[in-house]
């Protein structure tokens, strides 16, 4: 996989930052800190506020996320619940950076526009209580003459736990 660490034979074996992971997982060729992706995508890729598989959700900078965060939508479960595949969020074996597949993410915005979300934490085994501001979704469809982004085959699992995602979101 171009751009991934040589030690990562699979997308899910990746350990590192969210940006290079999201670039490979989504096929969207944007560089720089995660929070800068939204503005960089303007005029290059379509952007919006509707989750779609393969789209990148861009988290804004905040006290908890000084560089922002990017995550790739792997499944849409319902109008307020999706699954994401991302890296460098939960701790696994005591360290951050690992890739996680089909993680529950919920829309916590007051107007159902995905401008604020809650994310499932593996180390807490549930949704976190923090609400993170987001800019929106970047789609792999180019605005101009750029090639269409190609998502990684491992973006989602063979049997994602939709019921578990809904239980996580609505309990």
Image (spheres, rainbow, N blue to C red):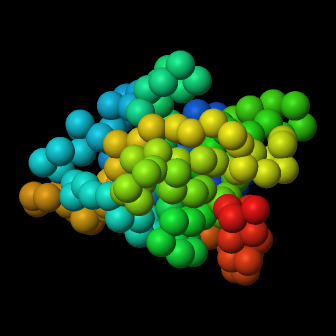
Nearer the observer, 112 or 138? 112
Nearer the observer, 5 or 100? 100
Task: Please tell me which residue is depicted at 69% across the width and 76% down the height of the picture.
Answer: 162
Q: Which residue sits furthest right?
A: 93
Task: Please tell me which residue is depicted at 23% across the width and 36% down the height of the picture.
Answer: 39
Expressed as whole percent of the image width and height from the top left, the position of residue 3 reads 49, 42
Query: Could you tell me if residue 132 is visible in this image?
Result: yes
Expressed as whole percent of the image width and height from the top left, the position of residue 122 reads 80, 47
Q: Quadrant of residue 42?
A: top left
Left or right, 160 with respect to 60, comes to right
Indicate whether 161 appears above or below 19: below
Query: Could you tell me if residue 165 is visible in this image?
Result: no
Q: Quadrant of residue 6?
A: top right
Nearer the observer, 86 or 163? 163
Indicate whether 158 appears above or below 44: below
Task: Please tell me which residue is depicted at 74% across the width and 32% down the height of the picture.
Answer: 96
Task: Please tell me which residue is depicted at 51% across the width and 65% down the height of the picture.
Answer: 80
Left or right, 51 with respect to 127, comes to left
The mark tally for this picture is: 0
Expressed as whole percent of the image width and height from the top left, the position of residue 99 reads 68, 48
Task: Check the picture and name the quadrant holding the C terminus.
Answer: bottom right
Expressed as whole percent of the image width and height from the top left, the position of residue 146 reads 17, 57
């Amino acid at each position: 996989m171009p751009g991934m660490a040589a030690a990562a034979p699979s997308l899910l074996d990746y350990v590192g930052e969210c940006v290079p992971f999201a670039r490979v997982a989504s096929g969207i060729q944007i560089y720089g800190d995660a929070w800068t992706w939204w503005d960089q995508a303007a005029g290059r890729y379509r952007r919006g506020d509707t989750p779609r598989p393969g789209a990148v959700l861009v988290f804004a900078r905040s006290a908890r996320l000084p560089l922002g965060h990017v995550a790739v939508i792997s499944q849409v479960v319902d109008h307020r619940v999706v699954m994401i595949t991302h890296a460098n969020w939960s701790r696994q074996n005591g360290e951050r950076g690992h890739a996680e597949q089909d993680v529950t993410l919920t829309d916590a915005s007051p107007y159902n526009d995905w401008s604020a979300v809650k994310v499932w934490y593996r180390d807490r085994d549930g949704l976190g209580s923090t609400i993170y501001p987001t800019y929106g979704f970047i789609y792999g469809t180019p605005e101009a003459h750029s090639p269409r982004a190609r998502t990684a085959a491992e973006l989602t699992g063979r049997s994602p736990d939709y019921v578990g995602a809904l239980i996580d979101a609505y309990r």
